[in-house]
Image: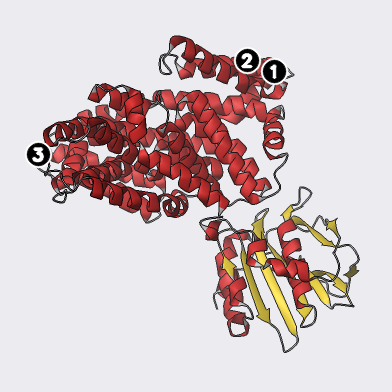
Amino acid sequence: MKALSPLIVFLVLYLVTSIIAQDFYKVPIVVAFLISSAYALLTVKGTMNERISIFAKGAGNPTMVLMLAIFILAGAFAASAKMIGAVDATVNLALRYLPERAILPGIFLASCFISLSIGTSCGTIAALTPLAVGIAQQSGISVPLMVGLVVGGTYFGDNLSFISDTTIVATQTQGCSMGAKFRVNIRIVAPVAVLMLIIYFFLGQQISTPTEVGAVNFWLVLPYLAVVILAICGMNVLLTLGIGILLTGIIGIVIGTYDIFGWFSAMNEGIMDISELIIVTILAGGMLGIIRHNGGINLIIQALTRHINSQRGGEMSIAALTFLVNVCTANNTVAIITTGPIAKDIAKRFKIDPRKSASILDTASCFTQGILPYGAQVLIAAGLSELNPIVIIPHLYYPMFIGVALLLAILFRYPRRYSKLIAILLPLMILTACKKETTYRTYENGRLPYLLDVPDTWEMDESDPIFIKFTNPEHTISIGCEIAEHTMIPEIYFNAFYEFLYKEHEADIYNKDLIQKTDSLYIINWKENDSTFVFDGSKPMNGYLCGIQVTTTTTTLQEGQAIFQHVFESIQPNPNFIAPAIYEDEDLMDFYEY
């Protein structure tokens, strides 16, 4: 437990003192992380310089540095956009076009759209709550209900926005792009959002139209629209935010809101506003770096996964861990920062797609934050509406339902495209159809960038200098691993090589259901001749494509498929791999794109 003691110190210090003070935002979280980080340094053996070096490596790893850069640009964009009136313009745009007799779904939709655009639930609540309360009072709607749908809708954007700090942290800690995470996450929560619109539509049929809102200046909405559209199109997030900042500057100067120095001042104010989050990220990264160095991460993973033997269980443990930390910290961003590295290790162990693990992190944290009466979002809404936080909680339908949707997504392996193991692609009956169980041994060769399992009884075939082959004459099944320099294909040619291979064997594809192509693997099955079938798969490892082929006959087709599955799943990086001299071939790319 010593390895985990810094995390325990942080949780006890922050949670206990917050309970004593009866205010989860009275105890500065930065101070809590500072004290626990100082304690973490004491748990490491070595000189003080060596301890600080370990802390600095955790705080300054590439993921953390990129995250900090995104935070800085997001803060600068949010403040400079707010200064020119873009927030008010976005609110007015959403409210002006509310359908007749549809106030409740309209306000909910406005909350979703605004939070998705500006990337902050707190900012959306601050902008919409006074308007929602006024509409409720004038139209006889329950004020807690109206405030609840505003707060609930903000979690739609907090969960999905490309400039939301939870999205930034979730994607950066899991190593996936925001666009990829968005496409997975939207499949989990979109049905809930549609369900909420339907419910609110029927609840609001007897309500009159809202009061007038201000004029809409479409130029002021442009920066937010540009950021959302560019991010959805897959542009680099730093470049996207940079363009957004530039647009706010140009528009602000043209309409006379500020001059260039006022623009600089607005950006500086935004960066300063996010400084606490930057400090928390640095301290949390350093503390977790020490915990990892001391073996604490492995201890947590073992405790959470001790009785877990499936991908579903791994996903459930990520959600449970996020929930527990969020309850203790009352901050969904801090919860993801704290649990993100642990979640990534769990995802690797159980082969969970990074896009799915990032979605689980973000959705679980938004669900938890949405049901906490001491969370920042509920407290802000309660203050603006002069309500007790407890009376708002029962009306937070959207956060509650996305928690249910996340649980169902884990239990029923949804979205299936991002939840499948190769075992799902290759039907389970293949495994049970084998006449006898195949045992395996791990094969290692310093010339191969990866390790893999091979059938125990198979022998090495030395006849081919280009391939490493293991054969079993009884079944005529072979595994070929390319090792010659000209067949060691760099990872950068992943897509080109796949397209080349697919085009070459397109006419001979045997089982189209087995074809899978993602950013991290591909699988193709083709018929070489009347009696021979080839299962071919590849995934990047140590900078090269790791290709596995299993060749089998009609009579051993099912067994060959099961063996391919096992071997393909067993691939892992070879720590003893010695990269060959760079092979310069100007025609390599042309060859694969012939």
Disc 3 packing (10 Å; few <14; some 14–19; many ≥20): few
Mark 1 = which residue?
A: 43
Q: Is residue 235 above or below residue 433?
A: above
* Residue 295 placement: quadrant: top right
Percent across and percent down for residue 121 are 33, 35
Relative placement, left or right, of 17 versus 113 is: right
| Crowd band around label 2 with a 10 angstrom C-alpha radius: few (<14), some (14–19), many (20+) | some
As measured in the structure, the alpha-carbon distance from the residue carrying label 3 to the one carrying label 1 is 61 Å
Image quarter where the C terminus lies is bottom right
| Tags 2 and 3 touching, CB below 8 Å | no
The amino acid pointed to by label 1 is: Thr
Coloring scheme used = secondary structure
Under tag 2, what secondary structure? Answer: helix
Gap in angstroms between the C-alphas marked 1 and 2:
7 Å
- Residue 348 percent across, percent down from the top left: 65, 47
Element type where label 1 sits in the image:
loop
- How far across and how far down the image is residue 158, in percent? 38, 39
- Under mark 3, the amino acid is Thr
Which residue position holds label 2? 39
Residue 484 seen: no
Q: Which residue is mark 3?
A: 211
